[in-house]
């Protein structure tokens, strides 16, 4: 599909080969989006540290959720590429208007709104935001007291920690 700019990508990754063919892909287990080299079968899942790529030929588990039963499917549209990967996109392929910005930023302190979906109170910082391509919205992982909270949340499940958790946002 030619979404990933090969030259730019290899300048940062210092890996790959002349036949390397990069494309954006999403894990089937937890919908983490990264870049896959379809020639060498390397999956670059950390946009800030390409050295943490995993090979899915050697039985590696999913780097995000540790599932051993995982594979990748290619992304279909530019709109699904998360903001941390925008630098790797071919020039001119992405417009800002293609996707909403995440409501919460990495490191922002938030509290979980208790409701029928969320019965366990959590307060922590945003660890990672992932673009949920089927729902077309951002999902968030939290870190609380140095540990990752296993559940992931939609923006409507969270409020900034300085806000009263009982003040619900009106549903749109
Ligand atoms: Zn996973």
Image (cartoon, helix red, strand yellow):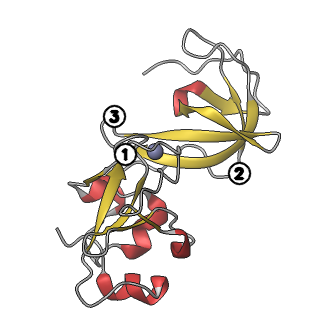
Q: According to the image, label 1 marks what residue?
A: 70
> From the viewer's perspective, is residue 33 above or below residue 7?
above
Q: Nearer the viewer, mark 1 or mark 2?
A: 1
**Percent of width and height locating residue 88:** 38, 74
Nearest to the observer: residue 54 or residue 3: 54
Nearest to the observer: residue 54 or residue 164: 54
Q: Is 46 placed left or right of 97 in the picture?
A: right
Q: Is 61 placed left or right of 167 in the picture?
A: left
Q: Neighbour class for label 2 at 10 Å: few (<14), some, many (≥20)?
A: few
Q: According to the image, label 2 marks what residue?
A: 107
Quarter of the image where one finds residue 98: bottom left
Secondary element under disc 1, as helix, strand or loop, is: loop
Secondary element under disc 3, as helix, strand or loop, is: loop
Cβ(mark 3) to ligand 1 < 8 Å? no
Q: Nearer the viewer, mark 3 or mark 1?
A: 1
Q: According to the image, label 3 marks what residue?
A: 135
Cβ(mark 1) to ligand 1 < 8 Å? yes
Q: CA distance from mark 3 to mark 2?
A: 24 Å
Residue extending farthest to the top is 116
Q: Is 92 placed left or right of 132 in the picture?
A: left
Q: Earlier in the sequence, mark 3 or mark 1?
A: 1
Q: Is 110 placed left or right of 77 in the picture?
A: right
Secondary element under disc 2, as helix, strand or loop, is: loop
**Percent of width and height locating residue 43:** 40, 65
Name the residue at 25% across, 55% down: 75
Q: Earlier in the sequence, mark 1 or mark 2?
A: 1
Q: Are marks 1 and 2 in contact (CB under 8 Å)?
A: no
Nearest to the observer: residue 55 or residue 121: 55
């Amino acid at each position: 599909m030619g979404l990933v700019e090969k030259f730019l990508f290899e300048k940062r990754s210092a890996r790959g080969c002349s036949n390397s063919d990069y494309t954006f892909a999403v894990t089937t287990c937890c919908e983490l989006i990264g870049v896959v080299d379809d020639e060498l079968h390397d999956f670059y899942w950390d946009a800030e540290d390409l050295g943490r790529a995993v090979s899915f030929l050697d039985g590696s588990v999913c780097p995000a959720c540790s599932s051993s039963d995982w594979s990748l499917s290619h992304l279909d549209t530019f709109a699904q590429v998360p903001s941390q990967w925008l630098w790797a996109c071919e020039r001119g392929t992405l417009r800002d208007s293609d996707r909403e910005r995440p409501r919460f930023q990495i490191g922002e302190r938030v509290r979980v709104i208790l409701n029928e979906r969320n019965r366990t109170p959590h307060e922590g910082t945003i660890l990672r935001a992932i673009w949920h391509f089927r729902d077309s919205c951002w999902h968030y992982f939290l870190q609380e007291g140095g540990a990752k909270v296993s559940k992931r949340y939609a923006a409507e499940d969270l409020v900034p920690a300085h806000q009263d958790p009982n003040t619900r946002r009106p549903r749109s």
